[in-house]
Amino acid sequence: MDNVELLMSFGLTRQEARVYILLLGEGALSGYEAAKRLGISRSNAYAALAGLVDKGAAYVAEEQAVQYHAVSIKEFCSNKLHYMEELSETLERQIPKQKQEDAKYLTIRGRRHIEDKFRNMLKEVKERVYLSVSASVADLFREELAELTAQNKKVVLLTDEQYILDGAIIYYAGKRSFASGHTGCEETVDGQIRLITDSSYALTGELQDEETSACLYSANPNLVKLLKDALANEIKLIEIEGKSKDIDKEG
């Protein structure tokens, strides 16, 4: 995503984002100057500047000629996030409570949406979490996982490389295709994920690029049990292989 698209995620229109970037780079400008620099009509420039002022991204300096000053990107984003947090709390109080999740199977597409779901599932953990992911994927959620272990919640991780996470139970599956549960593969499947939280919710699928990523999410007890059994079998196999290696060393 380029800077314009990133700013649009904070509520600016494309035109407002372009004018805002110009103000950040040039300093104070009048509407006429902004229009001339960007090659847009004065009416569009003034509309964009008014929008920036209204959204807290610019201030007006009324001196000999009206000029617009950009609010720093850090201040603008921080203010926006604070405001959205306040709105979120208000909505949580006012919106009717969500009905209890049923056992439907839901498809989640797009890498960002899958990461969001994964992260939110971790934040909702009450007692325990089991996950089978590559070390690189685990790193995406290190902060949330560390928070769980700090709260003495059980975290069991199966991964493809040596991984350090204080308080977690970690199993190293090596070059096994740990995420699919099969053995004998020469390479791990880096983007495959399995996540079970509180023995009640499951997320499984592939985390690849934005277009091809897709996962299945459900509170269906059959899917949860299926994934739990697969993970348990994988752990047993890792433990057996570990004991075999110990015996070989002793012999």
Image (cartoon, grey):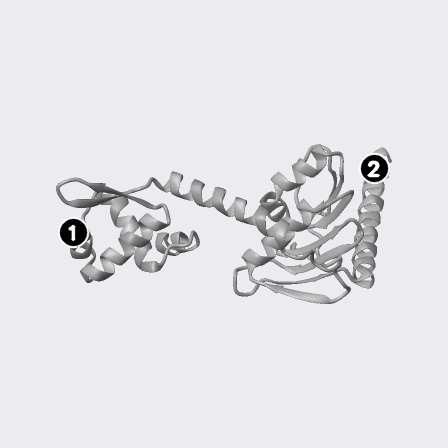
Q: What is the count of numbered marks?
A: 2
Question: Image quarter for residue 48?
Answer: bottom left
Question: Image quarter for residue 127?
Answer: top right
Q: Earlier in the sequence, mark 1 or mark 2?
A: 1
- The percent coordinates of residue 108 (x first, y second) are 62, 63
Identity of the amino acid at label 1? Glu
- The percent coordinates of residue 17 (x first, y second) are 33, 54
Question: Image quarter for residue 152?
Answer: top right
Looking at the picture, tell me which residue is in the foreground, 234 or 137.
137
Can residue 31 be seen in this snapshot? yes
Task: Name the element at disc 1.
Answer: helix
Number of other residues with Cα within 10 Å of mark 1, as a class: few under 14, some 14 to 19, many 20 or more? some
Q: Which mark is residue 148?
A: none
Q: Nearer the viewer, mark 1 or mark 2?
A: 1
Residue at coordinates 76% horizontally, 60% vertically from top-left?
219
Task: Name the element at disc 2.
Answer: helix
- Whether residue 40 sits left or right of residue 247 in the image: it is left
Could you tell me if the residues under marks 1 and 2 are in contact, i.e. CB atoms within 8 Å? no
Residue at coordinates 83% horizontally, 37% vertically from top-left?
246
- Picture quarter with the C terminus: top right
- The percent coordinates of residue 25 (x first, y second) are 25, 44
Residue at coordinates 84% horizontally, 43% vertically from top-left?
244
- Picture quarter with the N terminus: bottom left
Q: Which mark is residue 33?
A: 1
Identity of the amino acid at label 2? Asp
Number of other residues with Cα within 10 Å of mark 2, as a class: few under 14, some 14 to 19, many 20 or more? few
Can residue 163 be seen in this snapshot? no
Residue at coordinates 54% horizontally, 56% vertically from top-left?
112
Q: Is residue 250 above or below residue 125?
A: above
Q: Which mark is residue 246?
A: 2
